[in-house]
Image (spheres, rainbow, N blue to C red):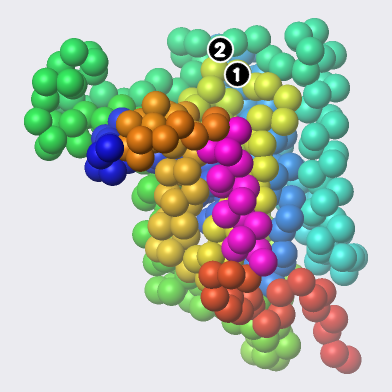
Amino acid sequence: MDILLLLDTSVLGTTIRMATPLLLACLAGLFSERAGIFDIGLEGKMLLSAFLAAAVAYTSGNVWIGLLAGIAGSLMLSGIHGLASITFRGNQLISGVAINFFASGITVVAAQSWFGQGGRTPQISGAARFDPIIWPGALTRIRDLLQANLPTKIYSQIISGHAIIVYIALLAVPLAWWILYRTRFGLRLRAVGENPAAVDTAGISVIRLRFGAIMIAGVLCGIAGAYMSTALQAGFVREMSAGRGYIALAALIFAKWRPWQALGATLLFGYLQALALRPDIIEKAIGLKVQVQLLDALPYILTVVILAGFVGKAIPPRAGGEPYVKER
């Protein structure tokens, strides 16, 4: 029995990879909800972008074109959500749920129509996929890693060996903090989520700010979905988002709508997903055999616990979920 095995460098490296789509989706929800727009449709945007990224990357043989296609698909859904909830002042939750249903259905139908492989794309490889970046001096062979010291393992398995999108996601955290708390745009964005009438009185367009926020969310969801199908896996499979959009929303509530806390929350969820892939390490660490099904369910159990309010009171933006009607 050795609890320290739970902090194995291979598990921590997998944690970062599993947390990346959650982090990007969580930051997407952060921008959207800070502007007063609740976005349940994170799941659908990630799913559609994952399909388009894999399909276009396979067809064109270029993963960057696939990434752009995934972002374009996510932006399209963001535009629809904005049109429904901002322009027509519809119910934001219903709009998000509708986007999720649409993405769930259209991806399977389109994949079957285009590739005829039961709702999935063919496996992608080579230039059609994001390969891990191996940093100088990092070890890659298992035999060498087993004999390496701890700093070398940390460098080789935690810092090195990730796709470029992983590093982009990590850099997005301080960038999001800087935008929200150190720029005029961020100040206005936070203000429009708290008191849109005051922002409108100051002569600033509430509609423009909210559309800008959901477009940023669309880009981030597009990158998250593309990462899942072109880096985390080698192609698209039906429902591959597997509830990650909802987990990202739970992480956002857990983080109380703050960027740095969002990083910690998504790493926690990523760690649980990484442990589910290594039941052998858990058995060695605690001396008990744990059912794989229970490990797979842990992130979703934690999601329910967070959404039920057992982690403390989380106060969302005051104008969140409410369409803004300009006073005349």
Q: In this rendered view, identify the residue nearer to me: 115 or 43.
A: 43
Give the percent coordinates (x, y) of residue 9: 26, 35
Q: Secondary structure at mark 2?
A: loop
In the image, what residue occupies the spot 45% across and 31% down? 289
Residue corresponding to mark 2: 124
Q: Please name the amino acid that badge 1 sits on.
A: Gly
105 versus 312 height, above or below: above
Label 1 Cα crowd, 10 Å radius (few <14 / some 14-19 / many 20+): many
- At 36% from the left and 24% from the top, the residue drawn is 132
What residue is at 85 percent from the left and 39 percent from the top? Answer: 102
Q: Give the vertical position of 130 relative to 46 (above or below).
A: above
**Which quadrant is the C terminus positioned in?**
bottom right
Q: Where is mark 1, residue-wise?
A: 235
> Percent x, y for residue 222?
61, 40
Q: Which residues are magenta?
A: 293-308
Separation of residues labelled 2 and 1 (CA atoms):
6 Å
**Callout 2 touching callout 1 (CB < 8 Å):** yes
Front-most of residues 83 and 269: 269
Whether residue 189 is visible: no
**Quarter occupied by residue 201:** bottom right
Q: Residue 124: x percent and y percent?
A: 56, 12
Q: Kindly identify which numbered label has been placed on residue 89.
A: none
Q: Amino acid at mark 2?
A: Ile
- Residue 147 included in the magenta stretch of the image: no
Residue 326, placed above or below residue 29: below
